[in-house]
Amino acid sequence: MVLSQKSVLGSLAGVTRRVTLITNPTYSTSTGSWLVNGLDADNQQWQIDLTVLPPGITQDLIKAGQQWFIERTTTYNRLTLFVGEMAIKTSKLPGFHGRFYSTTSQSTTANTPTLVSFNATEDNLGFRLASNTEIIVENTGVYYIHFRLQASSTTSVTQTINSWYRLNGTDLAYSANENTLTGNGLALISRNEMLNLNTNDILQIVWAASTSNVSLTTQPAQTIPFTMPGVPAMAVSILQL
């Protein structure tokens, strides 16, 4: 089989892939930088620039046989998340997954971090809920996580809303959002993450607002003037990569 090689230069900005490194770092005189090659599940070869590395990673730690997530910036492929040293994932089927949401509105006290709670499950394979606020991981792996909050205000004052991930009781560094809600209205808040999670890890979502006039609001299903399903106060989806 002939492998195709994607250049370190390209136009696919923002694309994320999981690859196994097939070379050790080598210096390229054509680009003036250190490079490494990776192979994805489709046998596509990707060239990765090592000029910018993830926090805590140095070039001497990078070697063939490791598995990484890479992301293309505007010009280069970069290493983003270390998975481990393992066989390449070849299955196209989804792994462990779950979707959890809330059909009841939730309130908070001004400037007080508050745990988001769940009361409904749409789909679940590989997780369990505890205390209505904890998602417990049953299998080690790398997961894509997306949460969405619908916040509403009962005052015309401009308010700040923050939300973030908490893992095993510790706030996850640089996982926060900050949003502004102006007037009596709604704000849709969302956040994506890729996390390397272990068995029995506990994932939680935290939110806070600058006043107690903000709540996470649900809307029931409607039939007039058109049929529409309900809107959850919050929802989180998790998919193993």
Image (cartoon, rainbow, N blue to C red):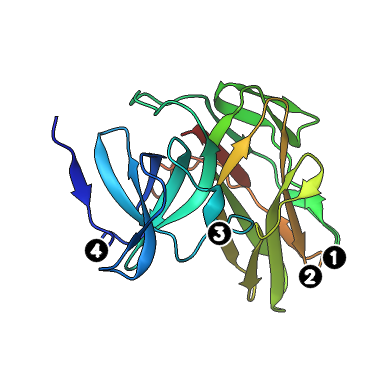
**Among numbered discs 4 and 1, the one appearing first in the sequence:** 4
Within 10 Å of disc 1 (Cα), the crowding (few <14, some 14-19, many 20+) is some
Which is nearer the eye, 103 or 65? 65
Which is nearer the eye, 210 or 212? 210
Mark 2 lies on a secondary structure that is: loop
Q: How far separated are the C-alphas under marks 4 and 3?
A: 30 Å
Q: How far separated are the C-alphas under marks 1 and 3?
A: 19 Å
- 95 left or right, relative to 74: right
Residue placed furthest toward the left: 2
Residue carrying label 1:
110
* Badge number at residue 210: 2
Mark 4 lies on a secondary structure that is: loop
Q: How many marks?
A: 4
Q: How far separated are the C-alphas under marks 2 and 4?
A: 41 Å
Residue 115 in picture, x, y percent from top left: 78, 46
- 225 left or right, relative to 141: left
Q: Is residue 114 above or below residue 223?
A: below
Q: How far separated are the C-alphas under marks 2 and 3?
A: 17 Å
Residue type at tag 3: Leu
Residue type at tag 2: Ser
- 6 left or right, relative to 70: left
Q: Residue at x 78, y 39 (%)?
A: 168
Which is nearer the eye, 6 or 237? 6
**Among numbered discs 4 and 3, the one appearing first in the sequence:** 4
**Among numbered discs 2 and 1, the one appearing first in the sequence:** 1
